[in-house]
Image (tube, coloured by chain):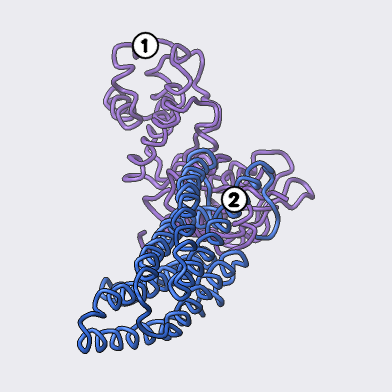
Amino acid sequence: MSPEPKMRVEALQAWFNNRHVLHDVTIDVPAYSILAVIGPSGCGKSTFLRCLNRMHELVPGARAGGGIFLDGENLYARGVDPVRLRRRVGMVFQRPNPFPTMSIFDNVASGLKLNGWKGNLSEVVERCLHQAALWDEVKDRLRHSALSLSGGQQQRLCIARALAVEPEVLLMDEPASALDPIATAKIEELMHELKERYTIVIVTHNMQQAARVSDTTAFFYLGELVEAGPTEKIFTNPREQRTEDYVTGKFG
Amino acid sequence: MSPTHTDKTYELELKDLRDKLLSMGGKVEAAIAASVRAVTERDGELARKVKASDVEVNRLEVDIDGACRRLLALRQPAASDLRFITTALKIVTDLERMGDLAVNIAERAIELAQAPPLVPLHDLSSMADMVEAQLKKALDAFVERDPVKAEEVMRGDDLVDALYLKLFHELLQLMMEESRAIRRATALMFTAKHLERFGDHAINLAEMVVYMVRGTDVRHPRSREVAK
């Protein structure tokens, strides 16, 4: 673990209208490692993830307080452009959501095109598809529709698309929950490779997945961060009784 | 363990594993007491019963191993459940070895019952009482998840060792003085050694109980210092 965290979350609060859904969450996101966020439905883990690239506030009536720092810069400070921020902090969603009318190539290139990027698109597309461990499977059909891919391939395509704009942090919201075990294993293997260059935060319902992929695990319950620590510690000897009850399957 | 598992079948499987371990522990406790009684009371029949009863201990070992493997494969246990199951996997080996030691003592009992008595055996009885109490306490600590009790077991070995050394020297002396006593004295020496080993296994159990409850490994403190 590097001494300087990539992101620093300080006393984060979040609301949907009057509903207070995150209470005073303080946690560091270590650089070049994987943080898994676990907890039962409604515990605030997805909201937490969405605060990290200011997507939370896109929901009408949603707001957040406290501070989130990316390399020491407050994301919620005046003058921060959320669109530019989301380029630095990318997101991969639960269901693969490629642009249905676009080819495989254009899906990966879409973010760069949108930004008016002038450069060798083919190079970037190939690099990102390589990084997403999809290149060998699609290199001969880059002009085919993205929908011609399997679910697992589509999800890796979405990861390639997220990588194209060269983010520093990758947020993954249940990235494998719609996939079969083989596609899931490919995504997890990919995550291990990606953490060499990116900082990853993953939200997952699947505790074994959190145990398999992450370096650090954070357990949320009823909008609070109950405990965060090295994944091995959380799954063998957690500090808090509530964590213990959750990871051993005692849900009250 | 505060609340119970949401999955009641899982809860039952864990309870069943615990019950099996206790049942095995109880059998080993009974076997060691009976085996030493067979020595001191020169009761070959009792010794043969001890030997026969080891089959059940062995069967339980296989059973418990299987149950642990199943739980690991099918339930992916975590935290205190994981520590409980890995502890079970380890202590089952100690318990099985303890059962074998009782059998070894029973074999000496059969041998000794066929020869004239050699010396008074109250020290051997005391040793047996001590290690049996150590095992009982270790099992209680396991059931009650009581690391303090387990630590008492870990400290309780000195008397056993002292008594063993005393017996060893007395028997050695006897052999030097009287060559016709060598065979019987050796059998008694082995018995004492088996009891001493039995006590060591009880310590292993206690150490695993501390790990199970606290999640900290208390074994081999010196080797860990070296590693640092």
Q: Which chain is blue?
A: B
Return the disc, 1 or 2, that comes first in the chain's sequence: 1
Chain letter corresponding to the colour purple: A
Point 39% across, 67% down: residue: B105
> Residue A143: which numbered mark, if any?
1
Q: Is residue A35 visible?
A: no
The secondary structure type at the circle numbered 1 is loop
Label 1 crowd (10 A; few <14 / some 14-19 / many >=20)? few
Q: Which mark is residue A248?
A: 2
Q: Is residue B109 above or below residue B61?
A: below
Instruction: State the image coordinates of residue A203 (x, y, percent, origin top left).
Output: 54, 42
* Residue B164 higher or lower than A125, as above or below: below
Q: Position of residue A3 (x, y in %)?
A: 37, 64
Looking at the image, residue A16 sits to the left or right of residue A98; the answer is: right
The front one of A22 and B211 is B211
Mark 2 secondary-structure assignment: loop
Q: What amino acid is labelled 2 in the image?
A: Thr
- Amino acid type at mark 1: Arg
Q: Chain of mark 2?
A: A
* Quarter of the figure with residue B220: bottom left
| Chain hosting mark 1 | A
* Residue B226 seen in the figure: yes
Q: Residue at x 44, y 11 (%)?
A: A148
